[in-house]
């Protein structure tokens, strides 16, 4: 299926963050590690990641809570209740990229098993020089609207 640029600034990219990617203090999530936004390097099983995987929230129908729940059902990973979902406005993602002279864009890239699949493009690949500041900006943005999986399902 063809990919399409998500151009509505108020629409959302939803990223799944595993518990190990969350900064937790006394059982409360207080942050997201910037490494949660790093692209995976090539290994024996997978090629180098070219974009960050997520879901396009507004693809789904319903209330905000129902849409977020739908995202959970189409994320092809085993999610634990201690994991979290980060809702990030597409316009804010672009703004954070602009701060580092990076063109960050979200594309709706439907897949057969995940019709709301979206990719965040423009993050430096693992083989590129790292941009720790960009990853920190994205982590701060993710923390602004984060919800634990156990509160969604």
Image (cartoon, helix red, strand yellow):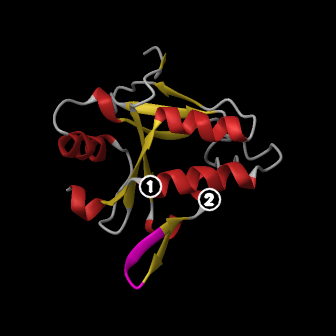
For the image, the number of numbered tags is 2
Distance between the alpha carbons at the discs numbered 2 and 1: 14 Å
Q: Residues within 10 Å of mark 1 (few under 14, many from 20)?
A: few
Kindly report which numbered mark, 2 or 1, lies closer to the viewer in this rendering. 1
**Horizontal relation, residue 125 to residue 147: left or right:** right
Nearest the eye: 34 or 109: 34
Residue occupying image coordinates x 79% and y 44%: 127
User: Could you tell me which secondary element the residue under label 2 belongs to?
Assistant: helix
On screen, residue 65 versus residue 35, left or right, reads left
Q: Residue at x 30, y 27 (%)?
A: 59
Q: Which residues are magenta?
A: 26-30
Asked if the magenta segment contains residue 80, the reply would be no
Q: Is residue 139 above or below residue 124?
A: below
Q: Quadrant of the N terminus?
A: top left
Number of the label disc, if any, that sits on residue 109: none
Which numbered marker is on residue 144? 1
- The main secondary structure of the magenta stretch is strand
Residue position marked by numbered label 2 in the rendering: 34
Q: Which residue is found at the position 72% from the left and 53% from the top?
A: 133
Front in this rendered view, residue 62 or 140 = 140
Q: Which residue occupies the extreme top position in the image?
A: 2
Picture coordinates of residue 32, whole percent (x, y): 52, 63
Dot 2 or dot 1, earlier in sequence: 2
Residue 42's spot in the image, x, y percent? 70, 46
Q: Residue furthest bottom?
A: 26
Name the quadrant containing residue 36. bottom right
Q: Secondary structure at mark 1?
A: helix
Could you tell me if residue 113 is visible in this image? no
């Amino acid at each position: 299926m063809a990919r399409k640029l998500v151009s509505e600034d108020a629409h959302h990219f939803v990223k799944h963050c595993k518990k190990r990617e969350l900064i937790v203090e006394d059982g409360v999530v207080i942050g997201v590690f910037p490494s949660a936004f790093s692209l995976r390097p090539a290994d024996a099983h997978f090629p180098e990641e070219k974009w960050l995987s997520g879901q396009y929230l507004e693809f789904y129908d319903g209330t905000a809570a129902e849409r977020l729940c739908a995202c959970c059902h189409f994320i092809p990973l085993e999610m634990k209740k201690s994991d979290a979902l980060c809702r990030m406005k597409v316009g804010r993602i672009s703004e954070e990229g602009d701060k580092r002279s990076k063109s960050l864009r979200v594309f709706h890239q439907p897949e057969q098993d995940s019709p709301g699949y979206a990719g965040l493009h423009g993050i430096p690949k693992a083989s590129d020089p790292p941009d720790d500041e960009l990853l920190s900006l994205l982590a701060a943005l993710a923390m602004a609207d984060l919800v634990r999986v156990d509160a969604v399902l």
